[in-house]
Amino acid sequence: MSKEINRIDIPLDQLMMREQAAIRAAKRKKLKSRILKPLLVACGLCITLLGSGFFSPAIATALANVPYIGIIYAEFGDIAAKKIEQEQLMTKIGKEDTHGGLTMSVKEAVYDGNRLLVTVAYTGRNGVSLEEEVVGTNTLTINGEPIDVAMGSTGQDDIDRNTIIEHHELTLSNTDIYGDKIEVALDGSNLFGYKGNWHVDFTLEKLMEEVISYYPKVKSSTNDGLYKLNVAKVSFTPLLTRIDVLVDYPKELDRNDQWPFFEFEVTDSEGKLYNRANMQMGATKDYGHHIILVLPPMEKMPKSFTLKPGKTNEQGYWQEIKELEMIVPLEP
């Protein structure tokens, strides 16, 4: 299984080595896993995972014949996959660009003001290759500008020797920064063994299902006052449950690039645990002062969340910082 970094333009180049080290560590622990959940994706770094033979023939049939291929998100392990498939939340796009023997086709997409998901298929007349040397690059933009993301991932795999399916998942740094209707564009260059440039653009409207937000302002701090956390907002949207945590620490840690990236375990009032296996964690572009936790969308809102912040110790294991634990009420 080969892997490479799919780059997003970000101003925090100094963090690349830190993120690459995290990815290498994750690879050692996840050798049997086809799709890696974003673990330490601070600053919007995107991880691209490439594989071979991942999909069953049923997926190829769905891709060819079914107007909505939301089933693809279950295959890629997306946190909203169940709801996407059950409620057919995807919007059929059906726009493509063909030249040089390769077709880039945007099949479907969905956007809820917090997350953007896009499904793309590539079909090559002379076959397509997932070899790292010939995969090429592609870029998603909104309203003609790079997307302001807190975390994201791109997964690719082959359906057969002529077709590759691609799944883009982006969580925005801030809620509703682009409004109710967005102009999305996908640009590709030298893709899968074919030379040239491809472009597809489309208009996408925001899902208008109800969004519920709470502003609990629950705080905690270490006994020495070095680190302080503030749960500023909890949002329930069609595609996610989002917890925004603000982090305060001494300014010299910014200058020395020693700022802490806390990892969390979250337990709801029903006792369900969310951690690396079923939750995403990322940060906006301000040195970890704004951490975002992304849980699956919820049919029934819990009465509270318990947040257990922690850090990875020298042995590579997550260790809770007990004094930073917070109970976040979700009732009026």
Image (tube, rainbow, N blue to C red):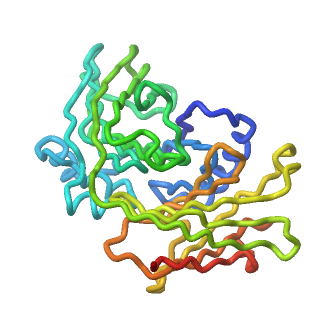
Residue 80 appearing in the image: no
Q: What residue sits 36% from the left and 45% below the top?
A: 117
Residue 108: x %, y % from top left: 25, 41
Image quadrant where one finds the C terminus: bottom left
Q: What residue sits 44% from the left and 86% below the top?
A: 270
* Left or right placement of residue 43 versus residue 249 in this view: left
Tell which residue pokes out farthest to the bottom in this image: 270
Residue 210: x %, y % from top left: 30, 61
* Left or right placement of residue 190 versus residue 289 in this view: left
Residue 277 appearing in the image: yes
Q: What residue sits 31% from the left and 37% below the top?
A: 120
Picture layout, residue 71 above or below residue 188: below
Residue closest to the eye, 216 or 259: 216
Q: How many numbered marks appear?
A: 0
Q: Quadrant of residue 100?
A: top left
Residue 146: x %, y % from top left: 50, 30
Q: What residue sits 60% from the left and 75% below the top?
A: 307
Residue closest to the eye, 329 or 119: 329
Tell which residue pokes out farthest to the left in this image: 65
Residue 155: x %, y % from top left: 42, 45
Residue closest to the eye, 124 or 258: 258
Q: Quadrant of residue 186?
A: top left
Picture layout, residue 221 above or below residue 132: below
